[in-house]
Image: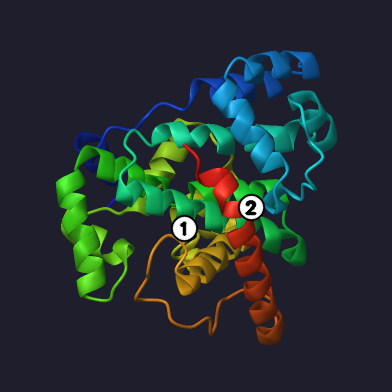
Amino acid sequence: MTEDALESIITQTVDLPAIPMVAARVMQLVGSPSCSIDDVQKVISGDPAVVSRLLRIANSPMYGGRGKIDSVESAIMMMGFDTMKSMVLASSVRQVYRHFGLFEKMSWEHSLGVSMAAGMLAPKLGQRRDEAATAGLLHDIGKIVINDKMPERYARIVESVYAEHTNSFEVETEELGFNHCDVGKLLARKWKLSPSLITAIGYHHTPNSVPDAMSEHRPLCKLVNAADRICLYLGVGGAHPVVDALDGIGIAVAENEMFRFVDEFRETFVTEKLKFMEV
C-alpha cells in the first residue's frame, strides 16, 4: 500500500487533533530570527497548566534538571530555544488526551516512562536529551488518537494483545489496516515536527526499517525503541506480556551496563513519576 493510500484510510477513519495552541505559537516564534526570550515567555505564561508541567519537566532527570529552575525565563536561559521548543511541546501534549480513563492513565504513565528513559539514555548514545525525551513522550500518540475515535473497538484490540500475548502494532495492523505508528507519523507531519521526531514516532517499533533517505534518524529510533522496551520490561504503564527480556535490545550499550541503567531508571521513575501524573 502506498503512503498516500494509507493516509487516505487513516484520515477517513480517525480525526487528527490540532497541535496545542501554545506549542504551535512557540514553535512559530522560535523559527523567527527576531524571536526573544520575552516573546516566548509571554506566550507560555498565558497557559498556567503548561507552565506548571513545563517547570516539572525542566527540573526532571529526563531533561537533566536539578530542581533549581523556578521560572519560564530561567528555563529558557538555561536550556536555549531549541530545547525549550521540545519542552513546550512535551508539556502541551497532555491536552491531546481528551478523556482520562484507565487506558489513558496507563498510556500517559508509559509515555512518561519512555520519555524519561530516552532522556536518560541519550547522553550515553551521543543523542540530544531534549529530542530523545520528546520523541519518547510522543512515540505512542497514535494510540490516543485511535482510541479517542473508536474506544470500544480499540478496547477489543487491547484485549487481544493481552489474550494472545502479542503486541498492539501487529493487532492494529491486522484489525484496522494501519497502526498507531502510521497515525502518529501522520500527526507529527500535520504538526510540522522535525524529521527526526516524525521518523522516531513512525518507526519506533521497526527502527531497522527506516528508509535509507532518513537513515540519519535511525539512531534516535533505536534509542526510543530501547526506552520503550525497558518500560515494557518493567511494566511501566501496566503489565506487558510480550517483553520479558532485554536481550538484543539493539543499541550500543554493553549488557551489564544496560541492566545497571534499568535499575537506575526504575529508581528514578518511581521517585519522579508522581510529579507528572497529575492532570
Is 101 drawn above or below residue 250 in the view shown?
above
Residue pointed to by mark 1: 203
Q: What amino acid does circle 1 point to?
A: Tyr
Q: Residue at x 34, y 40 (%)?
A: 100
Q: Nearer the viewer, mark 1 or mark 2?
A: 2
**SS of the residue at dot 2?**
helix
Query: Is 203 displayed left or right of 30 in the figure?
Result: left
Residue 132: which disc?
Answer: 2
Q: Nearer the viewer, residue 72 or 93?
A: 72
**SS of the residue at dot 1?**
helix
| Residue 260 percent location from the top left of the image | 69, 79
Is 47 drawn above or below residue 147 in the view shown?
above
| Residue 128 percent location from the top left of the image | 73, 51
Q: Residue at x 63, y 22 (%)?
A: 26
Is residue 90 in view?
Answer: yes
Q: Residue at x 32, y 41 (%)?
A: 145
Q: Nearer the viewer, residue 140 or 48?
A: 48
